[in-house]
Amino acid sequence: MFSRKFQSCAQLMLATVMMSFVATAPARAQQATAKLPNVVILATGGTIAGSGADSTTTVGYTSATVGVERLIAAVPELKKVANVKGEQVFQIASESMTNAHWLTLAKRINVLLASQDVDGVVITHGTDTIEETAYFLNLTVKSNKPVVVVGAMRPSTAISADGPINLYNAVMLAGSKEAVGKGVLVALNDQINAAREVTKTNTSTTDTFKSTELGMLGYIQGSKPYFYRQSTRKHTLESEFDISKLDSLPQVDIVYGYANMNRIGMDAFIAAGAKGIIHAGVGDGSVAAQMKPALVEARQKGVLIVRSSRVGQGIVARNGEANDDELDSVVSDTLSPQKARILLMLALTKTNSTQEIQRIFYTY
Ligand code: DAS
């Protein structure tokens, strides 16, 4: 069909194209990598780094045993969505998270995000206090770059472990433009939640993280984030809190409300040096008659009182179930007791004024 001469020309051209394709492969790979965002994974432990006796162990496993490099190696697909580097910041079950861990983590994140070589950060974390760490970072990270906190409800050794896909989604989200400026995000189970509202709602199921009535921000589907709302409260760059020079936080404790409660716990916290008390009252932050003298005496000692609620949803109304003007107390708005504790600790690093702290609770 074709002359021999034409065939040899065609073969020569094909060989030339192939050779140039192979020769430029490293540059193209470099170019492709250059296009991917740079995401740092800060590992702190938890179930996502946990291991069980066998593949059916989904409770009664050991948390915080797998290192960050193994977590990354277990998900080679991460390379498709980001250039990833890992740091093992701690290796703990998150029920043991402390204020000191939070200060270390927030300071490290702020150093990383100040670098133009870092586009986003992922924190792998136990699920028990993921909502608290995320909220603390929401108030202390000084960048609008994405910060995504991720965990897992099944250990890495379990059948259908949720850690690998959660980690993949979190890294993708942390490298995405859509997540810029959204505040600290918690991403598990293909859902994107805001740090302020998200909470663990089930002790063991993979769909445990929800923002219940105020709603999650969006979904992750097919390696892409889809946002449908964003938080209306200030966070990250808009936050007035600066922890860069802090090496501790004021002691704030939580008193849980229940029928027939007494003041023993509250008095003990204050005797041990608490500068603030979160009163997690029943209902709309109600104060039992037998507790009122304890609150009055606490205020006389200069201890700041925040009325929160054990209920979990809704606004704790100022001067509703108690006279806050008379008690000189603050209401937590919609913040859970555990998140109200975080905000009060940070507020007390700036002021003891009840009026100022009430403004802070209506702002964040
Ligand atoms: N103990 C839990 C924790 O580390 C395990 C987990 O769910 O991550 O928070």
Image (cartoon, rainbow, N blue to C red):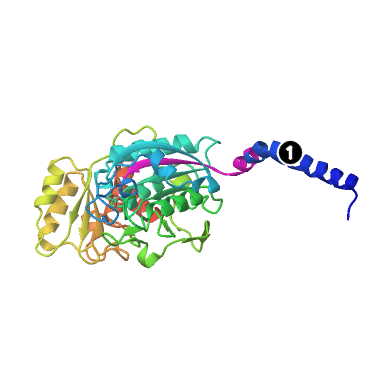
Q: Which residue is drawn at 37% across and 38% down?
A: 105
Where in the figure is residue 185, as x and y percent of width and height? 43, 52
- Report the front residue among 203 and 302: 203
Say how many tags the image has.
Answer: 1
Residue of label 1: 19
Q: Which residue is drawn at 18% across and 57% down?
A: 256
Q: Is residue 5 magenta?
A: no
Task: Inspect this view and state whether residue 105 appears.
Answer: yes
- Report the front residue among 195 and 314: 195
Task: Inspect this view and state whether residue 241 appears.
Answer: no
Q: Is residue 35 magenta?
A: yes
Q: Residues within 10 Å of mark 1 (few under 14, many from 20)?
A: few
Q: Is mark 1 within 8 Å of ligand 1?
A: no
Where in the figure is residue 123, as x and y percent of width and height? 40, 45
Q: Is mark 1 on a helix, strand or loop?
A: helix
Quadrant in the rendering for residue 30: top right
Q: Which residue is drawn at 41% across and 51% down?
A: 164
- Report the front residue among 2 and 346: 2
The answer to whether residue 210 is above or below residue 195 is below
- Report the front residue among 66 and 21: 21
The answer to whether residue 198 is above or below residue 112 is below
Residue numbers of the magenta segment: 30-45
Where in the figure is residue 210, as x and y percent of width and height? 36, 62
Q: Residue at x 81, y 44 (%)?
A: 11
The N terminus sits in image quarter: bottom right
Circle 1: residue type: Met
Where in the figure is residue 218, as x and y percent of width and height? 47, 62
